[in-house]
Amino acid sequence: MTQAPHSMKPKVVGIIPARYGSTRLPGKALKLIAGKPMIQRVLERCLTARCLDSVWVATDDERIVQAVKAIGGQAVMTSPQHPSGTDRLAEAVAKIEADIVVNLQGDQPFLDAQIIEEAVQPLLDDPTLPMATLMHPVARPEDFANPSVVKVVVDLAGNALYFSRSLIPYPRQDVPHQVFEHVGLYVYRRDFLLTLAGLAPTPLERIESLEQLRVLEHGYKLRVVETRGADHEFSGFSVDTAEDVARAEQMLRERGLT
């Protein structure tokens, strides 16, 4: 499938990888959050992003397909054997017509459509750019040393230099600066996604357990946009445990959204 000619607007497709088996919360895509399956909440949020021509759920389980179709959504079946979301995405893309692909996290029920648009824009502006993602300033000092909060540093053009679970940059001198947290929403040019899925895991990727380092280690550009979206605690919230489901419902109540 060829890239759309420059005279045509590229076809931008959102794909939500959602497998049934989850180590900490099996069947989490179908867990109810204030009466709605999580996958429905994710899908409804993504469908409000104006930049997306269509949104698909890529899953390995017929129960998730049925839940998506019940609300009028589109789903594509993929293998249960994929080691990562990127591999699931690549299989799904082989079956869907797209020029630009947005990897939407299936465990983020309150995703903000604005941040999807911010991440897609660089690839619309620059046809040579293979991939983009997002960051925002780390708000809480205790997160500087938290390895589950992934930090990113960029060059002067806004391209990623490195992602780490460690504190980067390390403040050796008292120079005013911000520390940025990586937001795990990725936008790929279709051809690049298929290339990336075929590359072997790299040393730094394995050491840090961060798949995005494979992109940098193979020498590709990865644009990182500082998101202007508000309420990161809410929009970036991920559900991994039963406690997270309860917290998600509490956040909806706190914001008057139930």
Image: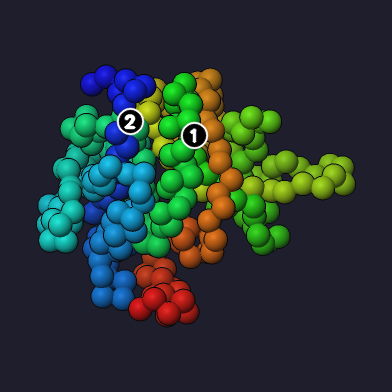
Residue sitting at x 35%, y 78%: 258
| Residue holding disc 1 | 122
Numbered disc total: 2
The image position of residue 84, as x and y in percent, is 35, 39
SS at mark 1 in the image: helix
Query: In the rendering, which numbered label is found on residue 10?
Result: 2
Q: Looking at the picture, which amino acid does disc 2 mark?
A: Pro
SS at mark 2 in the image: loop
Rendered position, 10 above or below 60: above
**As drawn, is 172 to the left or to the right of 158?**
right
State which quadrant residue 3 falls in. Answer: top left
Q: Residue furthest front?
A: 7
Is residue 39 something one can see in this rendering? yes
Rendered position, 202 above or below 154: above
Query: In the rendering, which numbered label is found on residue 161?
Result: none
**As drawn, is 9 to the left or to the right of 251?**
left
**As drawn, is 96 to the left or to the right of 239?**
left
Residue sitting at x 23%, y 54%: 20
Residue sitting at x 15%, y 57%: 72
The image position of residue 225, as x and y in percent, is 56, 41
**As drawn, is 223 to the left or to the right of 166?**
left
Q: Is the N terminus in the top left, top right, bottom left or bottom right quadrant?
A: top left
Q: Looking at the picture, which amino acid does disc 1 mark?
A: Pro
Q: Which of marks 1 and 2 is nearer the N terminus?
A: 2
The image position of residue 2, as x and y in percent, is 27, 19
